[in-house]
Amino acid sequence: MSVGPYSGSSRCILEEPVNWADGFVVVYDVSDRMSFLCAKSILRQIREESCKGPIRVRINVTGVFLVGNKQDLCNAQQVCEEEGWSLAQEDRCHFQEVSAAEDYLEISNLFTKLIRRVMESPKHCADRRRYSGSKSVAKLINNVFGKRRKSV
Ligand SMILES: Nc1nc2c(ncn2[C@@H]2O[C@H](COP(=O)(O)OP(=O)(O)OP(=O)(O)O)[C@@H](O)[C@H]2O)c(=O)[nH]1
């Protein structure tokens, strides 16, 4: 899913209505306070969207990651790591500071972690059980009626 750039506070929004999501990675730039405020606003919107009736967004704590990028820009830092931790705690999401420029493996690991957490979340497991349950019922129906239809 895409999130608009934040040139002006009016763009600190989710660009499209969210109909379905397993997870979100909300990224801000540690050398840009505005981007942090934008990330904060987006996290709030994600929570609000997930509570709205008609929009069924499958989100749980395991699926939202707040990421502070450009950790390498120590001299230009405008948002300290504690603020990131504090926002993540407030929003009950995961947090990590990274440097995409210096350590791409860190980014890859982050996504792996996100996927693993979503897959292992109780909600995802329940959905999977439900899906496989309905699949076996469909198989059963097909076994019983499918063959009979063929022989007619
Ligand atoms: N120093 C540093 N620069 C980075 C890092 N990650 C991205 N950049 C730089 O930040 C600039 C924007 O990166 P993009 O990949 O275009 O990211 P974007 O989300 O489109 O960023 P914006 O255009 O700022 O909205 C580029 O010049 C990147 O090289 C990082 O971890 N450290």
Image (tube, rainbow, N blue to C red):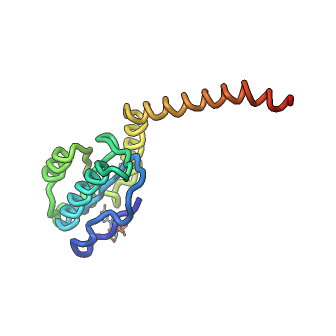
Looking at this rendering, what residue extends furthest in the right direction? Answer: 152
In this rendering, is residue 52 above or below 133? Answer: below
The residue lying toward the viewer, choosing from 77 and 143, is 143
The quarter in which the C terminus is drawn is top right
- Report the residue that reaches farthest toward the front: 152
- The image shows residue 19 at horizontal and vertical percentages of 41, 54
Q: As rendered, which of 120 and 16 lies closer to the eye?
A: 16
**Residue 74 place in picture, x, y as percent:** 18, 61
Q: Residue at x 61, y 27 (%)?
A: 136
Q: Nearer the viewer, residue 86 or 108?
A: 86
Q: Quadrant of the N terminus?
A: bottom left
Q: Is residue 9 above or below residue 135?
A: below
- Pick the residue in front: 30 or 40: 40
Please give left or right for residue 103 compared with residue 81 in the image.
right
Residue 87 in view, yes or no: yes
The reply, left or right, for residue 25 in relation to residue 144 is left
Figure quarter occupied by ligand 1: bottom left
